[in-house]
Amino acid sequence: MRMCRMKGFVLAVTAAICAAACSPQKKEAEEWQYLFDGTDLVGWETYLGAEFKPGLSWDSVRKLPPIGLNNDTASVFSIVELDGERVLRISGQYFGGISTKDEFENFHLQLEFKWGEKKWFPREGDTDKRDSGVLYYAVGEHGDGDGFWLRAQELQIQEGDCGDYWGVAGALADITSTLNADSVYQFDMGGELRTFSRHSESGRYCKKNPDGENAHGEWNVVDLYAYNGTSLHLINGKLNMMLKNSRIENDGIETPLTKGRLELQSEAAEVFYRNIRIQPLTELPKIK
């Protein structure tokens, strides 16, 4: 019975979101707050971990002194002109993130991204996927997440994997999922409700389903709906991940994680972002 209700809920949300996207109302447009509109990076701060160099393992790098807070002398995060408009460029040269100073809860976040061409060590290979990510409900100290990021839920931005879920530094959630042909858990609205965490059998990663990313070189629209611990990941209008019961684990104790900062990751690949905006939610979309 619970699974049937879950499936019905997902279908209802999907239909409502599609209807809203096709028929935007003036009231919604007036409620958008632009976090980045091409003008400046007021309201954001940067953090960079230690530099990856050949011969260093992940564990050894994150134990080194970080480059630190608001010390971006390499311009990893900058505003550039691209195709006649000013956008946020994340070079990817060092691992880290650019995060809002403000916290948000019960929101609809929308942004656009497209990949650049530059890749850096350790992701320089022709077959290595370009990578970034949107962290939300981000809390704690810079560097808590693997030495580079805040503690958070992650909407993965990675070539071919946009919308995937990662729990960062103790974040966890429940997701309806099934094992795919590669024996990897992926989002399935009719699947079993499982907990994804660093301590669970399922692990802290769940693959999106279906794929929604546009071809390389094209802009992609990302929509994130987050309300009372339930969040929806949409890529170009396609729902491909839903989290329930967002929470975080501290010393074996789980507490709700429903409010926090936003962070965009730098992960050894060039990526561009534009039109980063947010609006409050009083409920998740429903069919009228």
Image (cartoon, rainbow, N blue to C red):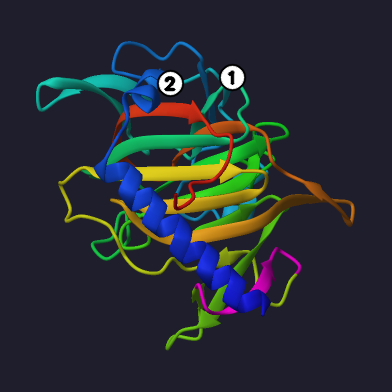
Q: Left of 73 or right of it: where is 176?
A: right
Quadrant assignment, res 109:
top left
> Which residues, given as a range, are shown in magenta?
189-199
How many numbered markers are drawn? Answer: 2
User: Residue at 40% across / 51% down in the picture?
Assistant: 16
Give the camera-side residue of 128 and 255.
255
* Residue neighbourhood size for the residue with mark 2, other residues' Cα within 10 Å, grouped as few (<14), some (14–19), many (≥20): few
Q: Is residue 156 magenta?
A: no
* Residue neighbourhood size for the residue with mark 1, other residues' Cα within 10 Å, grouped as few (<14), some (14–19), many (≥20): some
Residue 143 screen position, x and y as percent: 65, 37
Rounded to the nearest angstrom, the CA distance separating label 1 from label 2 is: 20 Å
Say above or below: 75 vs 206. Answer: above
User: Residue at 37% across / 39% down in the picture?
Assistant: 92
Q: Is residue 192 magenta?
A: yes
**Is residue 285 visible in this depiction of the protein?**
yes
Q: State the residue lying farthest toward the bottom.
A: 181
Q: What residue did someone put label 1 on?
A: 101
Say above or below: 274 vs 251. Answer: above
Residue 32 screen position, x and y as percent: 41, 22
Task: Give the residue type at disc 2.
Answer: Glu
Residue 161 screen position, x and y as percent: 37, 62
Q: State the residue lying farthest toward the front.
A: 288
Tag 2 or tag 1, which sits nearer the N-term?
2
Q: Left of 161 or right of it: where is 201?
A: right
Q: What residue did someone put label 2 on?
A: 31
What kind of element bears circle 1?
A: loop
